[in-house]
Amino acid sequence: MMTNLFSVFDPSANFNLPLNWVSGYLVIIMVIPTFWAISSKMNKSMNLITNKLYGEFKTLLGETALTGSAFIFISLFIFIILNNFMGLFPYIFTASSHLTLTLALALPLWLTFMIFGWMNNTNHMFAHLVPQSTPSALMPFMVLIESISNVIRPITLSVRLMANMVAGHLLMTLLGNQTATASHFILMSLIITQILLLTLESAVAIIQSYVFAVLTTLYASEITSH
């Protein structure tokens, strides 16, 4: 019996060990087939997705981006989407629904972009704080607004991913708790609703992984493009 509605997202487990976080390592099982000598259907699918994402991220980063930097965001996308899909299986903890993981992904990336930008493109970073055609009277306010929006970027990135994963899982948990006392008609309605929600959650898992990777790519392109 759940003592708390949010206990499904609690990363604690028996034996005083954080066994739920093992779900994050299950991603490695999905990656191992890509190293097979004989190409499989999964390997071909991964190569197709990687090539498509590489072309898209390369365009977003621009010509001034460092060589191979697009692969960082491709790896980020694959890691998040596999963790999101792992959480759709029963009795597997969704690591991407916890702020510990999402913030650990967003904060180091953002901090790296800031350090690289201020050390190598200082003038561009200062110019980015004041958009073009800004009136002189509004420049101090624009600097303050741009600075605040820049600082909260890792928070918005991590909270967006966490909140979208938590919301769907909570709704599915609430509906699943009603099946024990439901009548036959209501039970069938709940099962159909759960199937639709599972389909929606699969789409959300893909979209949120893509949004996270694209936004980090755009943040990196702001640092390197000048």
Image (tube, rainbow, N blue to C red):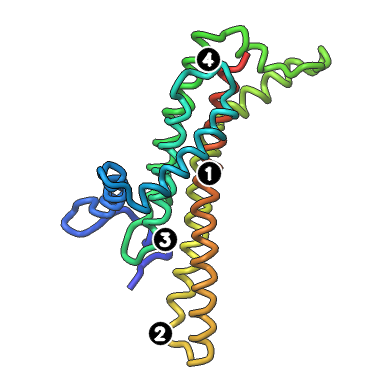
Question: Which numbered disc, 1 or 4, marks the residue closer to the eye?
Answer: 1
> Outermost residue, front direction?
38
Amino acid bearing label 3: Phe
Mark 4: which secondary structure? Answer: helix
Q: Which picture quadrant has residue 125?
A: top right
Separation of residues labelled 4 and 2 (CA atoms): 56 Å
Could you tell me if the residues under marks 2 and 1 are in contact, i.e. CB atoms within 8 Å? no
Question: Which numbered disc, 3 or 4, marks the residue closer to the eye?
Answer: 4
State the residue position of label 3.
6
Disc nearer the start of the sequence (1/4): 4
Disc nearer the start of the sequence (4/2): 4
Task: Where is residue 36? Give x, y as percent.
Answer: 26, 45
Disc nearer the start of the sequence (2/1): 2
* Mark 4 residue crowding within 10 angstroms, few (<14) / some (14–19) / many (20+): some
Query: Which residue lies at the image location 67% right of the left edge and 21% below the top edge?
Result: 144
Could you tell me if the residues under marks 1 and 3 are in contact, i.e. CB atoms within 8 Å? no
Query: Which residue lies at the image location 48% right of the left edge and 15% below the top edge?
Result: 116
Could you tell me if the residues under marks 4 and 2 are in contact, i.e. CB atoms within 8 Å? no
Amino acid bearing label 1: Tyr
Task: Where is residue 133? Give x, y as percent.
Answer: 82, 16
Q: Is residue 179 above or below residue 213?
A: below
Task: Where is residue 71? Give x, y as percent.
Answer: 43, 31
Mark 3: which secondary structure? Answer: helix
Q: Is residue 212 above or below residue 127?
A: below
State the residue position of label 4.
117
Separation of residues labelled 1 and 4 (CA atoms): 24 Å
Separation of residues labelled 2 and 1 (CA atoms): 37 Å
